[in-house]
Structure formats: structure tokens, C-alpha cells
Image: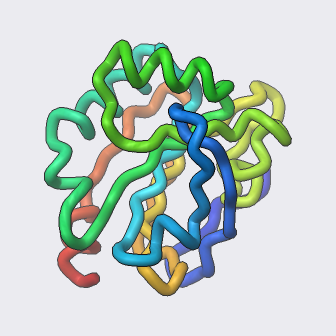
Amino acid sequence: MTSAKQVGEQAPAFTAKDQNGQEQTLTSLIADKAVLVVFYPFAFSGICTGELCSIRDDLSRFVNDKVQVVGISCDPMFTQAAWAKDQGYDFPLLSDFWPHGSIAQDYGVFNEDAGMAIRGTFLIDTSGTIVWSQVNGPGEARDFAGFDEAVAKL
């Protein structure tokens, strides 16, 4: 695993399909507002479900006039679709399935031994610069401390 992208660095561009089969690009996501990119290991897993449910349950914190949210894992698009439907996630969940983990690799949050993304969280402004980030290892729940302050500075 390479080191994760840092605050102040340019975010790597990506193109991936969301749970509805719609192609999403970083360029289109940051066209109007910042985007919070939330990498997670696996759909339907306990910690990941809890984390994304907390985003769903406080959606106005993560989707508003300044920011939007997108989740990314190495799960296939159809798994993302089933999980989004099951949990009521109305925000994009992108599939980094093939080439397997290439987006997570570009962000330095891919665990090659396990074939999964680790919990990398990146706030990217409209210029494509990472303005806040946090990386948590497997089994470590995500903490959004500092996120609100970073959004306020956008």
C-alpha cells in the first residue's frame, strides 16, 4: 500500500459507475461544489454499514450547498445497488471493482493483501485539491472530527 494522498495535494481523477450504472467522474462531481470521497472496505459489512447509515441519517451535513458525498468500494456495481436499496442510501456509491481497486490505489488507500479499500476519507474542493483527509485502518471506525471546520472554510 502506498501512502495516502495528503491535504494540499491534487486529488487523482477517476471515472466509475455508481449503483445505478451511471458514470461519475471526479471532474463532474466537483464542478459545482466540493465532494467528500468516502472509501470503505465492503458493502453489507458491520462497520461500513454503520458509517454509511450515519451519513444517511445526517445527510444535510454531507450534502448541502457547499458539499456532496460519494462512497467508493471495490464491490461490484450490482452489490452497491443492492446495498443502497437495502439501506436507503440516496447518495452515489461508486464501484472500484475493475480494474480492481485502481481508484483506491491512486488515493493510497488500497490494501492489496485483502483486495479492499481501507477507510480513507477525502474532502476535495472545486479546484480538485484535497482540503481535509482522514485514513482509518481495518476495524477502526471513521471519525469526522474536523470535517465541519474544513467545509466552513470552503
| Total numbered circles | 0
In the rendered view, would you say 61 is above or below 46?
Answer: below
Q: Which quadrant does the C terminus fall into?
A: bottom left
In the rendered view, would you say 82 is above or below 17?
Answer: above
Which is nearer the eye, 90 or 133?
90
- The answer to whether 125 appears left or right of 111 in the picture is left
- The answer to whether 55 appears left or right of 14 in the picture is left
- The answer to whether 54 appears left or right of 116 in the picture is left
Residue depicted at x 63% and y 67%:
5
Image location of residue 66, percent across then percent down? 24, 72
Image location of residue 147, percent across then percent down? 27, 62
Colouring method of the image: rainbow
- The answer to whether 113 appears left or right of 138 in the picture is right
Question: Which quadrant holds residue 21?
Answer: top right
Question: Taking the image as drawn, is residue 119 in sight?
Answer: no
Image location of residue 141, percent across then percent down? 38, 33
Image location of residue 136, percent across then percent down? 49, 43
In the rendered view, would you say 86 is above or below 92?
Answer: above
In the rendered view, would you say 103 is above or below 5?
Answer: above
Question: Taking the image as drawn, is residue 7 in sight?
Answer: yes
Residue depicted at x 47% and y 61%:
122
Residue depicted at x 72% and y 43%:
110
Question: Which quadrant holds residue 116?
Answer: top right
Residue depicted at x 81% and y 37%:
98
Which is nearer the eye, 112 or 101?
101
